[in-house]
Amino acid sequence: EPGSRVAMEDPGYTPARLLFAAQGADVASVPVDSEGIIVDQIPDNVCAIYVTPSHQMPLGMPMSLARRHALLEKARRIGAIIIEDDYDSEFRYEGRPTDSLQSMDEHGVVAYVGTFSKTLLPELRLGYAVLPAAIVEAVIKAKQLTDWHTSTLPQWALSKFISEGLLNKHIRRCHSTYAGRRERILSRIAGDLSPWLETIPCTAGFHMAVMLKASIDPAIDLHLLVERARDKALGLHPLHGFYSDATPRDGLMLGFGAIDLLDIDPALDRLRDLLMGFG
Ligand SMILES: Cc1ncc(COP(=O)(O)O)c(C=O)c1O
């Protein structure tokens, strides 16, 4: 509803922020720390809390179990719905998956949303939602008002693909490809890029956040780095664009969903040479 207040992580998924604002919502930006959204700083007057617990967008860390419990309790207390955007957790590389908020929810406060954009193709425009009973009717109405309904043919084909076990097979096959790319990037960052860069630990997905080390002396101007990289045909994506009210940290988002394994080293060589150039 226009005028409603919605809380989301800061930094967070910018398209979600823009979408809420476009619907007339007042978006409350809530800072995150190494455990995820800082629950104590979520205002009491929000009707929804949008979070990315498996793989915080953009920093990458998973939300801790303690924070998950605190968030569920807060949502219950203030009567808010949590929108759990689990956009890429099918690709997990380390450790046991943490329980989703939705599976921990005993009070019907979590709307779990997922997408096939990562496991299959963004072009499909197919996703899914597991909703608390209380909001099902409202969401169906909102969907009908948005585009009446999603094309049924791709939904039918996808349902067959899933029921024949082909989606799981596909995910298993892609997993080792993505894991190989991720390993390569991590080993370079722990190796020759370590004087300048450090990663935020993350266990899932297709991107990782790497931070410029605070100890670099003289400090590197991130904007200049991005500009110089562009001149060398290297696209760097700073984290600044994901911040709203919180002070941006100097870092980059490294995506490995689309890059070929063999292209990673030449790209990181170029980045290392640029970093060295700041002397
Ligand atoms: C946080 C987050 N949620 C959801 C999505 C997927 O969105 P869609 O299903 O609209 O392609 C993305 C894609 O990058 C994302 O980063």
Image (cartoon, grey):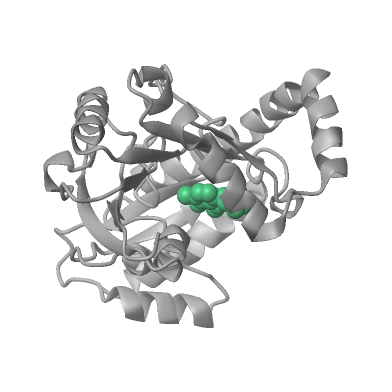
Closer-to-camera residue (160/253): 160
The picture places residue 153, in percent across and down from the top left corner, at: 88, 42
Between 262 and 121, the residue placed more toward the observer is 121
Please say if 46 is above or below 232: above
Which sits in the foreground, 58 or 190?
58
**Rendered location of residue 77, percent (x, y):** 18, 32
Q: Quadrant of the N terminus?
A: bottom left
- The vertical placement of 213 against 24, above or below, is above
155 left or right, relative to 73: right
* Residue 259 in sight in this render: no
Q: Residue 269: percent from the left, percent from the top?
A: 49, 60
Residue at screen point 29% across, 40% down: 80
The quarter holding residue 81 reads top left
Query: Considering the image in quadrants, where does the C terminus appear?
Result: bottom left
Residue at 47 percent across and 63 percent down: it is 19
Judge whether residue 26 can be spotted in this image: yes
State the residue in front, 149 or 233. Answer: 149
How many discs appear?
0
Q: Residue at x 37, y 27 (%)?
A: 101
- Residue 117: image x %, image y %? 65, 46
Left or right: 87 in relation to 163: left
**Vertical arrangement, residue 149 with respect to residue 184, above or below:** below
Quarter residue 245 falls in: bottom left
37 left or right, relative to 151: left
